[in-house]
Amino acid sequence: MRTPSTLAITLLSLAAASSAHAAGKDPAAICAEAEERYVSLTGQPSSEADGVVVVTMYKYNFCPAQITVPVGTTVRWVNVDKRTSHSVLSPTAGMPESDRAFPDESVEFTFLTPGDQDYLCGPHWETRDMIGMVTVEE
């Protein structure tokens, strides 16, 4: 049987873990941090990347998680995490799983087929819900 102090410690630990998880899932805050990291790495905003659309990978999130692009657009996923590697794959777009992109590395894919194309991080889609969507328009 748990003592009151053990139960209180357990409940506090669970509350802290729940709070940290909820804080880790605030997409706006995470994506703002990801953009800051991208600018510090490249010296320019992601919106100014030449000839590609940039999606950052940070804290087990794609930023932004949903984008719309015309057919023929190349998407570059840039890992701005400090320690974690990610991969990208899109079975619906015919994109096989990429090699792991370590911090400061990137993966690119050109979308040639119109429609909604789900993509995900191979090692983190199931445990961390690291999933995104590219809507490809004619």
Image (spheres, grey):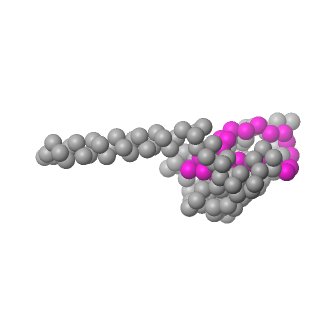
4 horizontally vs 119: left or right: left
Q: Position of residue 21 (x, y in %)?
A: 45, 43
Q: Is residue 124 above or below residue 99?
A: above
Instruction: Please tell me which residue lies in front, 7 or 71.
Output: 7
Q: Magenta stretch: residue 99 in it?
A: no
Question: Which quadrant of the figure has residue 137?
Answer: top right
Task: Look at the magenta stretch and give its main secondary structure.
Answer: strand
Query: Looking at the image, which residue is at 56% across and 50% down?
Result: 59
> Is 67 in the magenta?
yes
Q: How many marks?
A: 0
Give the residue displayed 64% in from the left and 55% down from the top: 80
Inspect this view and state whether residue 86 appears.
yes
Expressed as whole percent of the image width and height from the top left, the position of residue 58 reads 60, 51
Residue 69 pos. (x, y %): 80, 39
In which quadrant is the C terminus drawn?
A: top right
Question: Which stretch is magenta?
Answer: 50-72
Quarter assignment of residue 71: top right
